[in-house]
Amino acid sequence: MSSNLIQAGDLTLRVDPNWPDLSKGPKLVEVAGVAVDSKNRVYVFNRGDHPMAIFEPDGTFIGSWGEDIFNRAHNVFIGPDDSVYAVDAGDHTTRKFTTEGELLMTLGTPNVPSDTGVTDDYRTIKYGGPPFNVPTKAVLNKDGDLFVSDGYKNARVHRFTADGELVNSWGEPGEAQGHFDLCHSLTIHPDGTVIVCDRENSRLQLFDQDGTFLEEWTDLSRPCDVYIGPDGLIYVAELGHKGGLSLAKPTDNPGIPSVSIWTRDHERVGIWGDDDFTLPGAFFCPHGIAIDGDGSIYVAEVTVSGDAGRGVIPDDLACIQKFEVVR
């Protein structure tokens, strides 16, 4: 990996170590999720004092909102009408906003987790429950239905209508097909397939929208987020085994923190990352991913949680990076 150029299969990327410009912006404290609106503005969902920080593509800070709303940012998605869907793992809700931060809808009861038989440790989930118990991400299908992965202390995917009525749920704790061990994120492919990051089972699971299991991809290392690029390829933020080790379980594919690129037919066509996570363009704890209209890729990292008190992270390590496509 050079200091600025990165090769991922046929894709050449340039990392900008100075993005975003924080000289006039807020301090970003571990970025849990990132999303881009129709104007290419970048929404950086972080766990600092200004949780929804918004930047121009060149890194200029625009403003922020959510200061009195969010408990623990987890991930964010922006729909085709620029509605912002922010999942709060701390108070067990999924909220819909305008781009200016006006609250439009809340799913879940704030600070009231659902019953899954769990105690303090997510590994003690006894059964799948209703929405939500530490949810992780929300996305839309083509018809406007909302799908939410749930989560750290549940083991389910929930489907809602656009106005928030629960349609169906699926998943149970475990390792069998259709079961989850930390249901961490999801996306919907243009062909309608629901792709779920089953993080601690180190796999992606693919379902139809009614929850019928289709297939699994087991050649990944703790997938944290998944995103469909404008090229139709599937981009996966893989946590690997440097960050978040307090939640990790043994795997035959330990891996390094990376972003991998896949076809819908399950062919890996690119990957980047480095064992030295301090290099520009490398990762320690990749947690969220989004791609803008120009093809630039944004990768968010939860460096504080990922470090988990080990003290291996330098204070100036970036918690979000931008990768521009070299054309």
Image (spheres, rainbow, N blue to C red):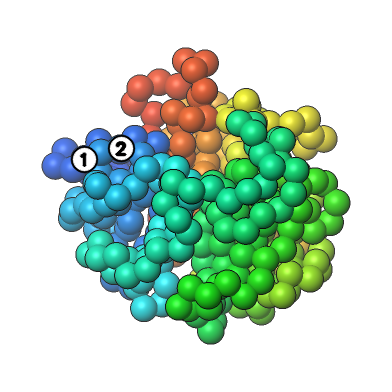
Q: Residue furthest top?
A: 311
Q: Residue furthest bottom?
A: 143
Q: Residue at x 28, y 58 (%)?
A: 57
Give the quadrant of residue 196: bottom right
Residue 130 vertical position relative to residue 307 in the rendered view, above or below: below
Q: What is the three-letter code of the residue carrying label 1?
A: Pro
Q: Which mark is residue 48?
A: 2
Q: Are marks 2 and 1 in contact (CB under 8 Å)?
A: yes
Query: Which numbered mark, 2 or 1, is in the foreground of this view?
Result: 2
Give the quadrant of residue 25: top left
For marks 2 and 1, give the CA distance.
8 Å
Residue 324 vertical position relative to residue 306 in the rendered view, above or below: below
Instruction: Say what secondary structure mark 1 lies in.
Output: loop
Q: What is the three-letter code of the residue carrying label 2?
A: Gly
**Image x and y of residue 65, in percent:** 23, 53
The residue to which callout 1 is attached is 26
Left of 135 or right of it: where is 253?
A: right
Q: Is residue 5 visible?
A: no
Residue 269 vertical position relative to residue 25 in the rendered view, above or below: below
User: Mark 2 or 1 closer to N-term?
Assistant: 1
Left of 313 or right of it: where is 149?
A: right
Instruction: Tell me the quarter of the image containing the C terminus.
Output: bottom left
